[in-house]
């Protein structure tokens, strides 16, 4: 039986990066991890740079909360991604965040075949287990 999860993002989530979400997004480099206090190419490696947010994971066994305080305890990941728009123009950006797999593991979610992520503005995206648990799928 297919288990589906829904992540609801609170209004204060600054940005959500779904790396690898579409075929036009191709990582320029492999994700790297940084330790708190290191100086990655983008800010936000320390807890003070993480905006306040709360995620609600709706699972078959009940709702689970994941907050910015929980995110500060996880190892940050730096990811460089190149996106190409419909006109063929490419832009490379650097993001610092935490792996979606680390978030799911932190709230005790591991057995699922797919999940739906819903942003506070109603935008949603479906993820397979493989994509959600990939090293280059991060919340930034």
Image: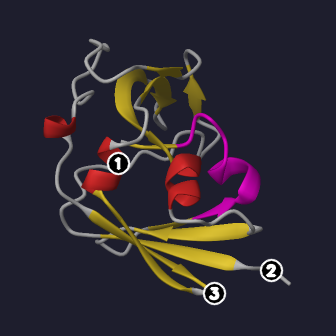
Report x, y in % for residue 33.
48, 22
Left or right: where 135 falls relative to 103: right
> From which residue to which does the magenta span run?
126-137
Left or right: where 70 falls relative to 53: right
| SS at mark 1 in the image | helix
**Residue 88 shows up from this direction:** no
Question: In the rendered structure, which disc, 3 or 1, sits on the residue that comes first in sequence?
Answer: 3
Estimate the spatial distance between the alpha carbons at disc 2 and disc 1, rounded to whole Å: 28 Å
Depicted 16 relative to depicted 112: above or below: above
Left or right: where 45 falls relative to 4: left
The numbered disc on residue 71 is: 1
Report x, y in % for residue 9.
34, 68
Check disc 3 and report the residue beneath it.
60
Residue density around tag 2, few if under 14, some if 14–19, many if 20 or more, within 10 Å? few
Image quadrant holding the C terminus, namely: top left
Q: Please check the rendered image and state whether residue 35 is part of the magenta-colored stretch, yes or no.
A: no
Residue at 66% x, 41% y is 134
Check disc 2 and report the residue beneath it.
2
Left or right: where 9 falls relative to 13: right
Estimate the spatial distance between the alpha carbons at disc 3 and disc 1, rounded to whole Å: 23 Å
Residue at 58% x, 35% y is 24
Quadrant for residue 17, please give it. Answer: top left
- Identify the image's colour scheme: rainbow, by chain, secondary structure or one colour: secondary structure
């Amino acid at each position: 039986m297919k288990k589906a999860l829904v992540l609801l993002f609170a209004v204060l989530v600054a940005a959500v990066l779904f790396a690898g979400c579409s075929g036009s997004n191709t990582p320029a480099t492999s994700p790297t991890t940084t330790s708190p206090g290191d100086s990655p190419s983008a800010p936000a490696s320390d807890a003070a740079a993480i905006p306040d947010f709360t995620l609600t994971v709706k699972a078959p066994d009940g709702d689970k909360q994941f907050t910015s305080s929980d995110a500060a305890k996880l190892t940050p990941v730096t990811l460089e991604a190149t996106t190409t728009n419909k006109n063929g123009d490419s832009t490379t950006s650097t993001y610092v965040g935490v792996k979606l797999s680390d978030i799911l593991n932190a709230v005790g979610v591991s057995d699922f075949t797919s999940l739906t992520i819903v942003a506070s503005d109603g935008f949603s995206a479906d993820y397979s287990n493989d994509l959600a648990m990939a090293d280059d799928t991060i919340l930034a």
